[in-house]
Amino acid sequence: MPSSPFARRSTARLLAGGVVTSLAALPLTASAVPTCPTPGTEAACGGRVVAEATQSATFVQYGLEFPNALAAIERIAPMIVDVTTLDQLTGDSSHVSAGGRQIFVVRITDESVPRDRKKQVVASLSIHGNESAGREGGLRYAEDLARRWQDEPDATVHAGDVDRPLRDVLAEVELYLGFTNPDGWAMGDALDTEHAIFNRANSHGVDLNRQFPTTGWTKLSGRPAPVTEPEARGWVAFVETLPNLTTATDIHGELTSATDSFADLMWPAGQWSPRRQAQELQLAEHVARSVERYFEDEGVLLDTLTPDGAPGPAGTKPATFATAYDIVGYDDSGFLGDYFVSEGAVEIDVENLFSHLVPSNIWNQPLEQAHVAAVRGVLEAVMVEATLTGDVEPSLDLGRIAYLDDPDVVSSTDANGFGFDPSVAPQPPEHYEADRLRYFEDLRADAGEGAVVDEVTASAIAADPAVLAAYDSLVVSDVAYPSDLADDERSAYVDGLRSFAASGGQLVLTDGAVELAADTGVVDRSALLTGQSQAGHVVFGDKDHRWEAELRGLAEQTYYEVPLGYPSGSSTRRAPHHGVDTDAWAAAGGTTVATFRDDASFTALGEVPVGDGAVAIFGAVLPKQDEGEPHLFGLADYAVTVTGGQVLHSILEYRRPTGELVEVTGELTVAVGGGVGVGDVLPGEPPTTISTDQAREVLAAFWSRLTTALLTDGAR
């Protein structure tokens, strides 16, 4: 076996007293179903250490059964299963629960393969102690893998419909199953006469899923400061040791489902480039399909899955995915899933229906069978996805894009400093420099060779609108008038924007820059609207517009507010939205694609024809950051969701209807149609190839003539 911090261990701490002993030496007394850890007793549990849910009488007991069951599972396949504890992984004896209990972690990997070739996968199971699905499914899945390895290591495991041999996956992956909240779990044990019911929090009464160091707004009121509970300190210390954290999941439970799904898969908040959006989308699709496959294989009947066994909601699906806000209706700071993302993981959170206060620690076999099946599907897909996600590339078909520069970057070292009083923070805040325009730099990189995503300044447009002639779309994000634009340049700048659209370009106005819809003459300034909500989102209609073609599931949230510094909560509405009165937009010939919240009079996403081109507005996707609230761990550059990216990228597929410019090896092929001529090329004639310099001269002259004609004809 390789010599490493994760080589076979013979020691693990007992649950109480801090006594160090061998897990293999723990007294293994036969126990009632659901566990049969003593050798030779597995027949009573259906040939397993941990019986299937349909053969179990109750939940696995933390104090009576759990450590013995882990030791027995480790014995099945010691070459891949390593049972350890969080304090052993970090080397810090304080990394136990608030109640002094050991936080067990099961590491599953092919020990014969060197670690430097592997990707790490981390799963947090039941961080809320009264949401038992994660630990019940995770414990059984650990046994599944041990038995498969022992019996048929070349059997396939899957992410969605992508199958790979288990042997190959465990050669590439280290899977860590963490039983995150032993205190809340143990409170529901049969021998705990003080509580006798599972508890959401730890023994300090603290919700551990608000304890992690997440980018953006940090809530400090009404809760302990981040990373002050021993469980959170231990997890952060452990995760920071992982050299190649690739995928992760945090498995929860819920009382209701906004999507009529048994397993609600939730994207966490983070700064996601277009490529990362594609990775998150594929992970969600694969996990949803894997849950569906496990339901099919195990014969789960969705119409019986309620706490009392009565018929379930009609149309319930195995799994659906969306953002946390879209599913549970709120965001917050300190989520473990968001922390995994900040550490580089492609991550999915999971809410399992009816694994919560109801039915709590009342066992319902069909319901728990479904919970276990769902968790098996999640864990398997997240594990296999670690071997696939590195090959994911976004599918982008972009036109030629220019975006307006904004020299004002939000920084902890600018004149505004941190923007809040650092003395109110329990620790010195981290420094940051946050620039939302990095989204376009990442878009250029992810779009691949040949993509045109260029920065242009407002002053350059004011001086010569011809600088826009080579582009299909110009994006002005949030700031309509950058600080480096002189007052005497404003009129020429606005004229340049108007002329760009009128001559066939698409002027894309996001967030606060929607005000330019008035300044360019599309609508009256009185038609401009602003609003605030808990999160950046829009409400789509019939989803029959071309911008909506890629949307999946319950899609409304378009940007994450918390990473940008905006506070969130059930009664907190600070995330900014911009738009136009719907009637005024329609009067201008505009199409409304989505509105703000449920306000049908507030167009937040839409397009309107202007001359030969168009103006598009997207009032909630790339806002500037908010520095007014505590943010101890920096601010994100941007926080575009999968839905926000899908819509924005669809908008940017726009091509000029009058022609297309394609640069090839130093030449420009000018293809002209739609009745607008360039130089001596007439509509309908074959494309003419001229040098780049010649093309620029022709286009500049054409642009100048067109601008003069438009202004003379009263286009202003």
Image (cartoon, rainbow, N blue to C red):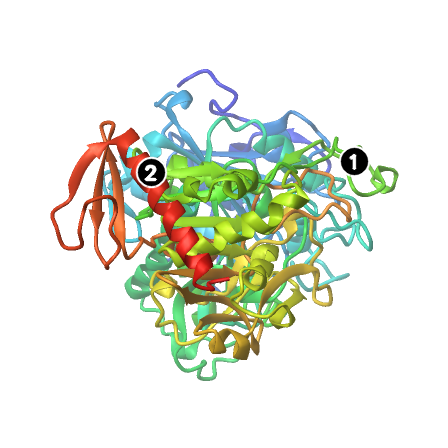
Q: Is residue 26 above or below residue 524?
A: above
Sequence-earlier tag: 1 or 2: 1
- Please tell me which residue lies in front, 711 or 187: 711
What element does badge 2 sit on?
loop
Where residue 556 appears, x then y in whole percent? 50, 65
Disc 2 residue type?
Ala
What residue do we see at 30% from left, 29% from top?
693
Q: Is residue 467 above or below residue 319?
A: above
Where residue 50 appears, x then y in whole percent? 45, 53
Residue where numbered disc 2 is placed: 451
- Looking at the image, the residue that sits furthest to the right is 423
**On residue 557, which mark appears?**
none
What residue do we see at 59% from left, 29% from top?
240
Classify the position of the N terminus by image quarter. top left
What residue do we see at 37% from left, 52% from top?
706
* Side of 611 relative to 161 (left or right): right
What residue do we see at 34% from left, 34% from top?
170
Where residue 446 appears, x then y in whole percent? 38, 38
- Please tell me which residue lies in front, 171 or 649: 649
Q: Is residue 315 above or below residue 9?
A: below
Distance Cα–Cα, label 1 vs label 2: 36 Å
What element does badge 1 sit on?
loop
Residue where numbered disc 1 is placed: 417
Crowding near pointer 2: few (<14 within 10 Å), some, many (20+)? some
Nearer mark to the viewer, of 1 and 2: 2
Disc 1 residue type?
Gly
